[in-house]
Image (cartoon, helix red, strand yellow):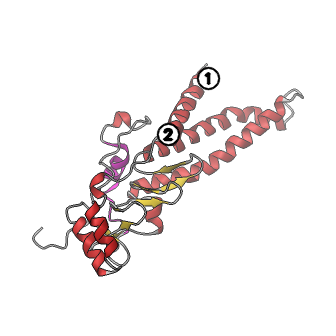
């Protein structure tokens, strides 16, 4: 009875978080980041270069944007016609800009970003617990299989297959879950690991890191009662993020 109760708890949490990861729509930049009709026309008329950047700087002067391209230019998406918020990237699969994009995951057929990153992390955690629980409860029968302690029936094959499948998934999931736990502790995304964010004055791979506790709350929120449940509780709006950088302005 205890095993059945524990199994169904892990199973329901695993399915719930998996469902939320798949069916939660990725968040896109709000309307304020989209160029107005006049700005679009101005951008199309101007030749590429400093003149276009002047149009983008004028459009982005009141926006909470601190990151730039490698050349120091305003990050602009030609396909979505918008100024990219910090940590926002264009997904070639979804063909739209995704807020705080981490990666496009084929296993969930969805972009993992600001709106569902917590669900994705819980999905990894509960699927790992689920597989570990199955492998642990099946282990005693797996040992009996090799010591001929079980009757010669088809159940022997089922026990062997179940143990190997659960154990193999546990190994792969533990490495992936551990990697994303490290990302959360550093307040990084997978894309930011491969290309550090470039701020107005310099490149800083830890520019969004606020310390372990605050980094954790950025993803899971301030209400600890929601941390282990696949309900949205992340902090912020996905368009702007606090940084650890000190402004170069001596008056601030």
> Residue 125's spot in the image, x, y percent?
52, 42
> Residue 144's spot in the image, x, y percent?
80, 33
Segment tinted magenta in the rendering: 205-221
Which residue: 34% across, 71% down? Answer: 44
> Residue 142's spot in the image, x, y percent?
77, 36
The residue that disc 1 covers is 4
The picture quadrant where one finds residue 230 is: top left
Which residue: 71% across, 36% down? Answer: 139
Q: Secondary structure at mark 1?
A: helix
Q: From what the image shows, is residue 170 above or below residue 44?
A: above
Q: Farthest residue toward the right?
A: 152
- Say whether disc 1 or disc 2 marks the residue closer to the N-terminus: 1
Is residue 204 covered in magenta? no
Q: Secondary structure at mark 2?
A: helix
Q: Is residue 246 left or right of residue 172?
A: left
Q: Is residue 197 visible?
A: yes
Q: From what the image shows, is residue 154 above or below residue 122?
A: above
Is residue 213 covered in magenta? yes
Which residue: 41% across, 53% down? Answer: 184
Q: Which of the pair 31/106 is nearer the observer?
A: 31
Q: Nearer the viewer, mark 1 or mark 2?
A: 2
> Residue 214's spot in the image, x, y percent?
31, 51
Q: Is residue 10 left or right of residue 32?
A: right
The residue that disc 2 covers is 23
Q: Farthest residue toward the left?
A: 251
Quadrant where the image shows the C terminus? bottom left
Q: Is residue 10 left or right of residue 215?
A: right
Quadrant where the image shows the N terminus? top right
Q: Which of the pair 130/142 is nearer the observer?
A: 130
Q: Which of the pair 121/38 is nearer the observer?
A: 38
Q: From what the image shows, is residue 201 above or below residue 169?
A: below
- Counting every numbered tag in the picture gives 2
């Amino acid at each position: 009875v205890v095993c059945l109760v524990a199994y169904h708890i892990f199973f329901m949490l695993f399915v719930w978080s998996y469902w939320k990861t798949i069916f939660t729509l990725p968040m896109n930049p709000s309307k304020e980041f989209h160029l107005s009709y006049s700005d679009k026309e101005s951008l199309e008329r101007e030749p590429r270069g400093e003149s276009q950047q002047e149009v983008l700087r004028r459009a982005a002067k009141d926006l909470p944007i601190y990151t730039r391209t490698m050349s120091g230019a305003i990050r602009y998406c030609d396909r979505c016609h918008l100024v990219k918020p910090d940590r926002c990237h264009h997904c070639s699969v979804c063909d739209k800009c995704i807020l705080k994009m981490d990666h496009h995951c084929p296993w969930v057929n969805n972009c993992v970003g600001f709106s569902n990153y917590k669900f994705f992390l819980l999905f990894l955690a509960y699927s790992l617990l689920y597989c570990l629980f199955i492998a642990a409860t099946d282990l005693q029968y797996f040992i009996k299989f090799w010591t001929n302690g079980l009757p010669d029936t088809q159940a022997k094959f089922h026990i062997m297959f179940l143990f190997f499948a659960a154990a193999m998934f546990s190994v792969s999931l533990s490495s992936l879950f551990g990697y994303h736990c490290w990302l959360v502790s550093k307040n990084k995304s997978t894309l930011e690991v491969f290309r550090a964010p470039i701020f107005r004055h310099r490149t800083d791979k830890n520019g969004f890191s606020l310390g372990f506790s605050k980094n954790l709350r950025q993803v899971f929120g301030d209400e600890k009662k929601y941390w282990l449940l696949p309900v949205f509780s992340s902090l912020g709006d996905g368009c702007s993020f606090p940084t650890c950088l000190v402004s170069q302005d001596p008056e601030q």
